Image: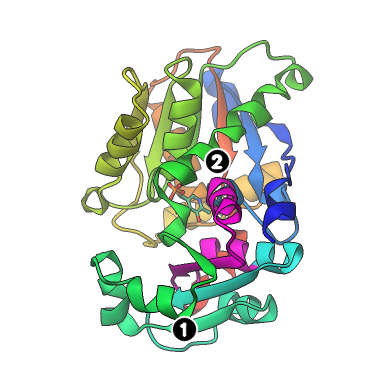
Amino acid sequence: MLSPSTDWLPQAPLDPLHLDWLTTAGIEVAILRLDQIDPLISGNKWFKLIEHLKAADQSGAQGIISLGGAHSNHLHALAAAGKRFGFTTVGLLRGHPQETPTVKDLQAFGMHLHWLGYGGYRARHEPGFWAPWREQYPELHPVPEGGGGLLGAKGCGQLVTLAREQLSGLGWSNYDGWWLACGTGTTLAGLVLAEAGEHPVYGALAVPDDHGVAQQVEMIVQEAGLIDPGYELLAASRGGFAKVDPPLLAFIEQTEQASGIPLEPLYTGKALLALKQQVEAGKFARGTRLVFIHTGGLQGRRGFSSR
Ligand SMILES: Cc1ncc(COP(=O)(O)O)c(C=O)c1O
């Protein structure tokens, strides 16, 4: 039932990113446009779902049940995939019913929604949380919040192949590292596993330290048995998850105008601004070539002003 989805190998262009602060520092950046893999199934979320969908398919499930907030990029990608490939999706939502643009899309994509309240949602890590949902939906496979864990990370390993296949189009024979936004660290962990130390992976944290990204990445890397992982996490949340300030918004506007590439303020905008700060602080030598991942999330922008 889920199998057509597990065969889909989306393409994302790897484009040169020309910005004056990169030129000044002599740094080359190519941007892997995961926001362009599909009009609806966008960003890193699809890659985090791949191995979960395969596991669901192998277990004979008819669909997926998962959780997220009222602006969730994860639920959005999951619901869009369910509609595209014809499998059932159920979403367990944080808080009380509200009509965000994301929620309207989830409904239009045919996802069945349950609102858990705030306390109910907080219980998602408790041992008995899934039991009643498994009972109600025995034919559905549960996927953790955001499509995380080792399975989520493994799917993101494909990003390395996606980028490497396109290096020659840029005239690059190699690259010196990756730069991307981290929310849970799953996508970064996937790159770290696939690179196995070959190229460093720099993660710009879109969340504060107490979200446990470092521990989460460490756990995945250890579970996969990687000895010398080669990654670095850098603070980039600018005061907290989803906190937005005027310099960030001005930077996004200037960058969009200069590059024509749309960014959103929670992940990609913060990650690119953190890169600018590090480049200007001299972190990278002239001639360094980095692959920046555009992790999508543009659908979430619609609801941002109403938060
Ligand atoms: C647009 C976007 N970029 C980046 C991330 C971070 O990905 P990860 O949770 O794998 O670190 C997320 C989700 O958390 C996201 O929605």
Residue 61's label in the rendered image is none
- Please report contact status of discs 1 and 2: CB closer than 8 Å, yes or no: no
Question: Quarter of the image containing the C terminus?
Answer: bottom left
In this view, 209 is above or below 198 = below
Residue at the outermost bottom position: 97
Residue that badge 1 annotates: 114
The span from disc 1 to disc 2 (Cα, nearest Å) is 27 Å
User: Can you see residue 19?
Assistant: no
The residue lying at 37 percent from left, 26 percent from top is 231
**What is the x, y in percent for residue 137?**
49, 76
Identity, as a three-letter code, of the amino acid under mark 1: His
**What is the x, y in percent for residue 26?**
56, 17
> Circle 1 — which element?
strand
**What is the x, y in percent for residue 257?**
68, 49
Residue 155's label in the rendered image is 2
Identity, as a three-letter code, of the amino acid under mark 2: Gly
In this view, 71 is above or below 266 = below
Position of 34 with respect to 150 (left or right) is right
> Circle 2 — which element?
helix
Residue range highlighted in magenta: 50-79
* Residue 194 falls within the magenta-colored stretch: no
Position of 178 with respect to 258 (left or right) is left
The residue lying at 32 percent from left, 34 percent from top is 223
The residue lying at 25 percent from left, 48 percent from top is 212
Q: How many marks?
A: 2
